[in-house]
Image (cartoon, grey):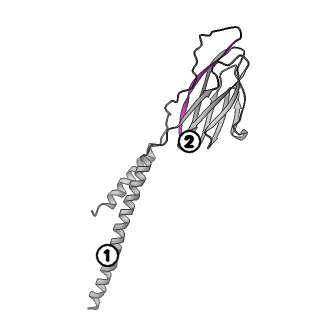
Amino acid sequence: MIFSKKLKNYHKIIGGIKIKWKFGKIVLFSLAVTILINSTAIAEEVKIIRTLSTTEPAANSEFAVTLNVSGMDVAGIVESIPEGFSYIGTSHPETQTSQSKQKIFFSVIGETEITYRVKAPLSGGGAFTGTWYDPLDKTEGVIANTDVIAKSNYSSKSNYSSKSEAQPQEPESKSTPFLSTVAMIAIIGLSAYCLRDY
């Protein structure tokens, strides 16, 4: 009699653990589904659009170049200005900006707009080019070229074509398929384990 009473208590304890374990399986399965959804979610598209205050500046004049940044909070941007054009300065923090010859390096930490000033040569043209890198997502891309030509006081027309605004290009993404594969295998295994009694 005492033995059967202890056995009933044992079954209640085991039954309570089983109920709690089934609830735990549901929680683990829900967590796995949440991780799966988040790991396959598409990140916000990175866009950097370059706009020039003019694509035909007067010879030896200054003009503004603006980069509108969206889709990333932290990034590195490298802008290349055409030969003959001179970098004057930027309103971007000095500690986040550096220059080497025709290249300007910007560190983006939450900024959505960067404006810098350039001086045109007496004559000539070229293209503003750029690249970006997002260290958090480990993605990189190219900023579309923007053509510019300095208007000489001696020529009324030029055959040089220019665009008023750069168009965004698709980012060249470098993903890590190994981590995605490991996460998927872990989620499938956990799901199978959680659902094995159902």
Residue 86: % across, % down: 72, 24
Residue on which disc 2 sits: 72
Mark 1 neighbour density, 10 Å: few (under 14) some (14–19) many (20 or more): few
User: Which residues make up the magenta segment?
Assistant: 137-153
The residue under label 1 is 15
Q: Does the magenta segment cover residue 68?
A: no
Residue drawn at x 33%, y 76% is 14
- SS category of the residue bearing label 2: loop
User: Which residue is located at x 52 percent, y 30 percent?
Assistant: 168
Say what secondary structure mark 1 lies in: helix
Determine whether 44 is above or below 28 in the image.
Answer: above
Name the residue located 67 percent from the left edge and 27 percent from the top edge.
64
Sequence-earlier tag: 1 or 2: 1
Look at the picture and state if 174 lies above or below 194.
above
Q: Nearer the viewer, mark 1 or mark 2?
A: 2
Residue 190: x %, y % from top left: 37, 58
Three-letter amino acid code at the position of disc 2 = Met
In front of the other: 162 or 197: 162
Q: Return the x and y of residue 193 as percentages of the image width and height.
A: 33, 60
Which residue is nearer to you in this view: 29 or 62? 62
Residue at 36% x, 67% y: name it: 23
Q: Amino acid at mark 1?
A: Gly
Image location (x, y in percent) of residue 96: 69, 40
Q: Give the quadrant of residue 155.
A: top right
Please indicate whether residue 132 sits to the left or right of residue 7 in the image. Answer: right
Using the image, determine if residue 168 lies above or below residue 27.
Answer: above
Tell which of 120 and 165 is nearer to you.
165
Mark 2, Cα crowd under 10 Å, few <14 / some 14-19 / many 20+, is many
